[in-house]
Image (tube, rainbow, N blue to C red):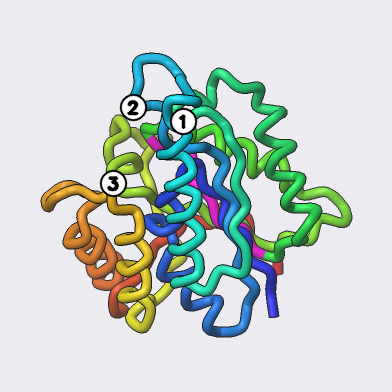
């Protein structure tokens, strides 16, 4: 049995990025945990007015817990970094948030965002994870994988530095339905097709990656570190 930690910037990123893999690993006996760093709501306003969005923030936290239960998540952790404004917080504070949960569950495998995403919160989450899980003596995590988030990863400017180049694929044929059920908990975040965050598009992404790897519906990851 392994401890799995998924570190996401916003509520719904975890499902979009690796919901099917989370459900599969949980079904196979691993303990899966989710860490959501941002509150996910205040970017809708011209300036951050957290009190105005208390209801939305509370709702997103409840939705993340419900989504996690569908996927078999053992526990969902949440922090309150400002939505789409992670660059206004000290990176060290984000790192310490990740380290706090790391010390509580000691994960063997970590999943997080792709470093080239358009969304600044995603990029800083990636940096914080790499910093928190530095490969020093005594570090338990043996693998770090980055995932794509539709409507962020593919919207970044095309370049060799930003391009998502997966080299690890997980067949989610048996758990795609759970991923879709979990995603539907985030009603306000869903969009109509052909938006990348529509149910139809998420299913197409899974089939696309499956085809590229000779599998059924799959999720794709980029190996950041893998120690055997």
In the displayed structure image, the side of residue 105 where residue 168 appears, left or right: left
Q: Residue furthest right?
A: 137
Crowd around label 2: few <14 · some 14–19 · many ≥20 (10 Å): few
Which disc, if any, is residue 188?
Answer: 3
Mark 3: secondary structure: helix
Crowd around label 3: few <14 · some 14–19 · many ≥20 (10 Å): few
The residue at the point 70 percent across, 36 percent down is: 95
Task: In the rendered view, tell whether residue 15 sits above or below residue 71.
Answer: above
Report, in whole angstroms, how far the alpha carbon at label 2 lies from the one at label 1: 9 Å
The residue at the point 83 percent across, 49 percent down is: 136
Observer-side mark, 1 or 3, equals 3
Question: Which mark is first along the chain, 2 or 3?
Answer: 2
- Which span is picked out in magenta? 109-117
Mark 1: secondary structure: loop
In the displayed structure image, the side of residue 104 where residue 86 appears, left or right: left
Which disc, if any, is residue 44?
Answer: 2
In magenta segment, residue 176 = no
Report, in whole angstroms, how far the alpha carbon at label 1 lies from the one at label 3: 15 Å
- On the image, the x and y values in percent for residue 19 come to 42, 65
Viewer-side residue, 40 vs 133:
40
- On the image, the x and y values in percent for residue 10 come to 46, 43
Question: Which mark is first along the chain, 3 or 1?
Answer: 1
Task: In the rendered view, tell whether residue 126 sits above or below residue 213.
Answer: above
Mark 2: secondary structure: helix
Q: Quadrant of residue 75?
A: bottom right
How many marks the image carries: the answer is 3
- Quarter of the figure that contains the N terminus: bottom right
Residue 114 visible = no
Question: Which mark is first along the chain, 1 or 2?
Answer: 2
Task: In the rendered view, tell whether residue 43 sits above or below residue 25.
Answer: above
Q: Mark 1 highlights which residue?
A: 83
Task: In the rendered view, tell whether residue 12 sits above or below residue 2.
Answer: above
């Amino acid at each position: 049995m392994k401890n799995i930690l998924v570190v996401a910037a916003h509520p719904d990123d975890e499902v979009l990025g690796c919901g099917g893999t989370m459900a599969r690993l949980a079904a196979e006996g691993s303990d899966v945990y989710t860490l959501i760093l941002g509150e996910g709501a205040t970017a809708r306003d011209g300036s951050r007015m957290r009190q105005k969005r208390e209801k939305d923030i509370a709702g997103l936290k409840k939705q993340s817990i419900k989504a996690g239960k569908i996927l078999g998540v053992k526990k969902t952790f949440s922090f309150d970094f400002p939505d789409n404004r992670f660059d206004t917080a000290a990176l060290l504070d984000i790192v310490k948030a990740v380290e706090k949960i790391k010390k509580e569950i000691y994960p063997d495998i970590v999943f997080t965002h792709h470093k080239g995403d358009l969304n600044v919160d995603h990029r800083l989450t990636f940096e914080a994870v790499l910093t928190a899980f530095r490969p020093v003596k005594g570090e338990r995590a043996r693998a770090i994988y980055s995932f794509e988030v539709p409507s962020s990863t593919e919207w970044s400017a095309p370049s060799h530095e930003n391009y998502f180049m997966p080299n690890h694929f997980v067949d989610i044929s048996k758990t795609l339905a759970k991923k879709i059920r979990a995603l539907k908990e985030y009603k306000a975040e869903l969009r109509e097709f052909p938006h990348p965050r529509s149910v139809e598009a998420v299913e197409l992404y899974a089939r696309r990656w499956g085809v590229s790897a000779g599998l059924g519906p799959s999720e794709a990851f980029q190996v950041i570190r893998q120690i055997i």
